[in-house]
Image (cartoon, rainbow, N blue to C red):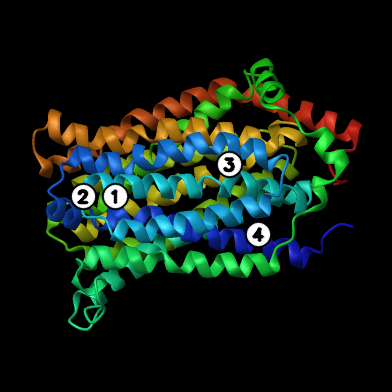
Amino acid sequence: MAPSPTYAWTVVVLFGLANAIAFIDRGFLSLVVEPIRKSLKLSDVQIGVLIGPAFILFYSLVALPIGWLSDRVSRKRIILFGLVFWSISTSWTGAAGRFWQILSARMGIGVGEATLNPAAISIISDLVPRQSVSKAVALFIAIGALGAGLGSILGGLLLGWLGQAHGLSGLPVIGAMATWQQAFIVLGLPGLVLALLMTLLVREPDRLGNAERAGAFGWRQTGGYLVTHRGSTLYVMFGFALISALPAVGAWTPAFLARTYGWTPAHIGPLFGLVQLLTNPVGIFLGGLVSDRLRQRGKEDANVRVILVGLAAALPFFLLFPLMPTAELSLLVYAPANFFMMVCFGASTPVIPLLVPKGMRAQALAIMFLTANLVGSLGPMLIPLATQYLFHDPKALRLALLLIPLAICPSSLLVLLDRRRAFIDQISRVRGEATNSREWPPT
């Protein structure tokens, strides 16, 4: 029996809340770059390793087996395990007193959070009708992006509260820790509460019956399908993956505001978070919504069209915001850059379930996330490498921030423009195959 719309969208919101917590837990490190760097005497390159490869590489590699498992076993259990694991790892970050300890915690967060996207998007694709897939997945991602904004706001307020005398100073062990360490310990708790709530409310969809197990594809079949149709799948994935390097600019923006304008993390958090709060969810949801509307009007390349417009609009703002004379103006110009970048993410992620047969969706998503994250992991490293070895000055961060959009936006535009026709053909091919096999619900 098909799930009720109320239940389906409730599940989407719960998964979105998990995604929001994931964004908070992974992103808080960017807000406290300067305190951690000074407390543990770390270099910009070491910080870059923590922001990028330590999290992203493990996130990406674990996503592959998670994608395979998500087409075969209980996706609900996969998500619950990951949520608990990354929440504990977040708190472990607060207990760290050395670089290798934070490194291990960031790896743990990456491993845990890798479970969410393939399994959750696969479930969402089974719960909502085809014509609403982009909108539902965009809502899932938008709520997560909302967490990025709230994380900065609440993180800044939390740092301010913990920095006061009452804070957690009365607690044994924890009270003796630095403010940023106490904050990480607190941030690990909401995920554990949500895991309990999801245990009670979420049911595994009927997809895991014997017929569906028999219809699940293996990695060899999935990889073979993607290679066979590489002109429309792998190339498009790569075009989307390039966009994943752009968030590195945002990851280093709090440090840029601190070094260039002298703002503190407690001051940066609420204001930078407000920008994210206003632009992240709206941009992502709008990207998915506009893609759906254009597709309903017969534009099979709807998602690519939205991304092309978003990239072209974001580029000038990305190039201007680091050059502003004041922090307030810088954030004001950063807001539209972030908004248009989020429009691109809202349009890109929902495409994969439409490009491949149902039995390989989660695996194809895992491959896309692997590609995107491997490319995206370069961004957080290129910026500190530029400040340390190209400009030889940590305060030259404003110049290093220009490099990523200058390289990424034109490259992604060229790839997607070149592959647009092949993308349209593949969408039509999969839709035809699904209709013949009754794989999709009627539209």
Q: Nearer the viewer, mark 1 or mark 3?
A: 1
Relative horizontal placement of residue 174, taking residue 21 as reference (left or right): left
Viewer-nearest residue: 288 or 87: 87
Q: What amino acid is at disc 4?
A: Val
Q: Which mark is residue 349?
A: 3
Quadrant in which the N terminus appears: bottom right
Q: Is residue 325 visible?
A: no
Disc on the earlier residue, 2 or 3: 2
In this rendering, the answer to whether 385 lies above or below 202 is above
In this rendering, the answer to whether 283 lies above or below 278 is above
Instruction: Characterize the local packing of mark 2: few (<14), some (14-19) or many (20 or more) Cα atoms within 10 angstroms.
Output: few
Relative horizontal placement of residue 393, taking residue 86 as reference (left or right): left
Which residue is labeled 4 in the image? 12
Q: What amino acid is at disc 1?
A: Ile
Marks 3 & 4, CB-CB < 8 Å contact: no
Q: CA distance from mark 1 to mark 2?
A: 7 Å
Disc on the earlier residue, 3 or 4: 4
Q: Is residue 8 visible?
A: yes
Viewer-nearest residue: 25 or 209: 209
Q: CA distance from mark 2 to mark 4?
A: 38 Å
Q: Which mark is residue 98?
A: 2
